[in-house]
Image: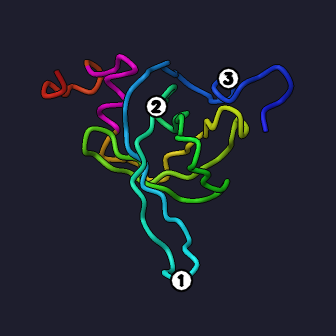
């Protein structure tokens, strides 16, 4: 949990951008008689950096801290790990990018205003 007086979005090092962008989270859920089932959940990315993101989840989705989930942004996927939760009331989770270069990284760089530094002319 966050230290007193600091929210989840204040703990990440490096450049961050506050965004309000749609994405999908693919969460493996354990079912009593069917093993695990992958569930695609629409989410909203609230804050992002090159190492992770804060994501708002629907109320009925509760991934566990440490669980690996897949984040999909504009059709580009990458594995992430649930690192922290802001509590049951807001259902916001902090995700750490597990893949060193997730497919959605150019989108993250664009949100951070780094597209020119990447030299990627196709990101416009």
Q: Which residue is mark 1?
A: 33
Q: Is residue 13 above or below residue 43?
A: above
Q: Residue furthest left?
A: 122
User: Of 37 and 112, which appears nearest the observer?
Assistant: 37
- Marks 2 and 1, the one that precedes in the sequence: 1
Q: CA distance from mark 2 to mark 3?
A: 15 Å
**Regarding mark 2 in the picture, which secondary structure is present there?**
strand
Q: Is 118 positioned to the left or the right of 28 in the image?
A: left
Q: Are marks 1 and 3 in contact (CB under 8 Å)?
A: no
**Regarding mark 1 in the picture, which secondary structure is present there?**
loop
Q: Quadrant of residue 2?
A: top right
Q: Which residue is mark 3?
A: 10
Q: Is 67 positioned to the left or the right of 46 in the image?
A: right
The image position of residue 30, as x and y in percent, is 56, 71
Q: Which residue is mark 2?
A: 45
Name which residue lies at 25% across and 45% down. 75
Q: Quadrant of residue 96?
A: top right
Q: Which residues are magenta?
A: 105-115
Q: Is 87 positioned to the left or the right of 119 in the image?
A: right
Which quadrant is home to the N terminus?
Answer: top right
The numbered mark at residue 44 is none
Name which residue lies at 30% across and 46% down. 103
- Marks 2 and 3, the one that precedes in the sequence: 3
Q: Is residue 26 magenta?
A: no
Q: Is residue 108 magenta?
A: yes
Q: CA distance from mark 1 to mark 3?
A: 41 Å
The image position of residue 106, as x and y in percent, is 29, 34
Pointer 3 local density, CA inside 10 Å: few below 14, some 14–19, many at least 20: few
User: Of 108 and 34, which appears nearest the observer?
Assistant: 34
- Marks 1 and 3, the one that precedes in the sequence: 3
Which quadrant is home to the C terminus?
Answer: top left
- Comparing labels 2 and 1, the label whose residue is closer to the camera: 1
């Amino acid at each position: 949990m966050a230290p007193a007086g600091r929210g989840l979005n204040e703990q990440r090092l490096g450049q961050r951008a506050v965004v309000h962008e749609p994405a999908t989270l693919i969460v493996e859920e354990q079912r009593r008689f069917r093993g695990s089932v992958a569930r695609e959940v629409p989410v909203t990315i609230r804050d992002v950096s090159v190492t992770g993101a804060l994501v708002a989840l629907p109320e009925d989705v509760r991934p566990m801290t440490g669980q690996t989930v897949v984040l999909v942004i504009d059709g580009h996927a990458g594995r992430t790990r649930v690192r922290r939760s802001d509590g049951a009331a807001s259902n916001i989770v902090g995700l750490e990018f597990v893949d060193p270069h997730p497919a959605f990284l150019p989108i993250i760089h664009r949100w951070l205003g780094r597209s020119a530094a990447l030299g990627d002319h196709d990101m416009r």
